[in-house]
Image: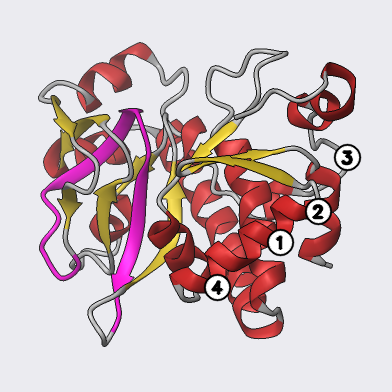
Amino acid sequence: MTFITFFNVNFELFMSISGLFPIDMWDFKSQSILTDLPEEEFAMLTAHQSEQVYNKGEIIFREGSYPSGIFYIKNGKAKKYKVVKDGGEQIIYVANTGELIGYHAILSDNRYPDSAAALEKSTITFIPREDFLATLEHSAVLSKRLLKTLSHEFAVLANSLALFTQHPVRERLALQLVVLREKYKVNFQPGVPVEINMAREDLANLVGTARENVVRMLSEFKEKGILETKGRKIIVKDVQQLIALANYR
């Protein structure tokens, strides 16, 4: 990335979108599920946990398989997706550091409704099904948090469905870039630009379009000064323009 003049680009690179964009409408909140659980309950939940490093693209679980436990993303990111008829993918959600995945299938006593794979090198903790269910039965705190999280996720998925059925590709791409910018602010330091590090194919699968369309629109956004690119990295320069383009209301 060419580092542009300090005073022209910088403010948009580092600014918060608080008050500009309702991020809670588009982002799950499973990070808070395990935060500050009572010590006894946390010990019960993690008694037999194991940790594994997944390389980019490595499968965490597959659609249709029986869930043997839940997964906590200690560090990294994962995509939850459905395989479509032509063998491609439709990414449903990008899970971030600190989030839980895989618990929906256990709660519904069913097979996984989708697949998950690492978007980047990720350290993920596995918690066995039996420990998760035993803790859930014992812990009113965990039960309440899961119920609240599931309710919120339903609202997010409803918004996402409306986005796909009512908005053109350009607006969907703009909105997803706004959301991804927030996800990639892990360990964010003021004065350091946020880099969205995602393959164009994955971004296209998230937006629900062809890779060529994403590449073309990113070039248009770049020409308008909305973003910069460096290889597969995308640096948002003007988040306010992206929010306006998203037309999410």
Q: Which residue is mark 4?
A: 213
Q: Does residue 165 sit above or below 38 in this rendering?
A: below
Q: Quadrant of residue 122?
A: top left
The residue at 60%/19% (across/down) is 188
Residue type marked 4: Asn
Q: CA distance from mark 3 to mark 1?
A: 27 Å
Evaluate whether residue 8 shows in this view: yes
Q: Does residue 37 sit above or below 25 in this rendering?
A: above
Q: Residues within 10 Å of mark 1 (few under 14, many from 20)?
A: few
- List x then y, in percent, for residue 141: 46, 32
Q: Which residue is mark 1?
A: 220
Report the quarter where the C terminus lies. Answer: bottom right
| Marks 3 and 4, the one that precedes in the sequence | 3
Q: CA distance from mark 3 to mark 4?
A: 30 Å
- List x then y, in percent, for residue 162: 66, 77
Q: Which residue is mark 3?
A: 19
Q: Quadrant of residue 69?
A: top left
Q: How many numbered discs, if any?
A: 4
Q: CA distance from mark 4 to mark 1?
A: 11 Å
